[in-house]
Image (cartoon, coloured by chain):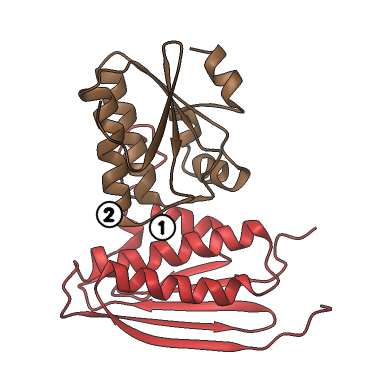
Chain colours: A red, B brown
Amino acid sequence: MSHSFTAWNIDRTIPSVLDVGHRLLEEMLGKIQAENWSSRDLFGLRLALEEAVVNAIKHGNRLDSAKSVHVECRSTADKIWIRVSDQGRGFNPEAVPDCTDPDRIDVPNGRGIMLMRNFMSRVEYNDRGNVVTLEKLRGENES
Amino acid sequence: MAVHRRLQLNQVGDVSVVRFVDRKILDEANIQELGQELFQLIEEEKRKSLLLNFSSVEFLSSAALGKLITLDKKVKAHGGKLKLSNIRPEIYEVFAITKLNKLFDIKDDEADALASF
């Protein structure tokens, strides 16, 4: 890799307020955009971060501002690693119906997890389902 | 006629061509407002032929997809036609992954879409 790279971390706890979440997302994406990612990877990172943080605030903590969301992000020369934790009851990601099932294709929600899995290198939930870990490797899709 | 804050509307023959004001369709409040403005075109203004031109859109979240699906249902319920055009490759990939490219009638550009109504 020809360009120099400086590793960085973000470790932040925010209230369950969508505007606060979006401000943090823009801060993270501003750092990510300054790095050498392809436009497709940048699109996928924005999409996955957006889905993970909004899911934690909206579905995990149910917009309860007394509950917080913990966002950690580590960017290194070979990958970006993100963990988003909420204080909700959690859920079973395997139990989320397949949104591409012809009988469910016109259901308006339930697509976020599938999109994260497609654009990230790794998406994992803890057993309780209130912590999601995302990883994106650099150069994964380069030919 | 209603004021649209999130949409730009242009009438081409019988077809109402919609462009989006926001380059990134992701903020919850904006998506709600966008949904209401789109639904209004069908339910109150009784427009039958709707073309959504995505040329200005760089990003949309799954919440925005939900609004488009609801719009599609409303258009069909009112006996209208909905088409989408000018979708950039990354966003088209979102439609393809979720198989929504089979639900929506997606054309490459506005001219193709207009000719297909």
Subunit under mark 2: B
Q: Residue A120 versus residue A127: which sits nearer the camera?
A: A120
* Helix, strand or loop status at disc 1: helix
Q: Which residue is mark 1?
A: A113
**At x 54% / y 65%, what residue is drawn?**
A45
Q: Specify the label residue B29 is tagged with.
A: 2
Q: Amino acid at mark 2?
A: Ala
Q: Badge 1 sits on which subunit?
A: A
Q: How many marks?
A: 2
Identify the secondary structure beneath mark 2: helix
- In the rendered image, the vertical position of residue A101 relative to residue A62, given as above or below: above
| Numbered badge on residue B95 | none
Whether residue A108 appears in this view of the structure is: no
Q: Position of residue A50 (x, y in %)?
A: 42, 63
Residue closer to the observer: B82 or A131: B82
Q: CA distance from mark 1 to mark 2?
A: 21 Å
Q: Are marks 1 and 2 on the same chain?
A: no
Q: Is residue B102 above or below residue A26?
A: above
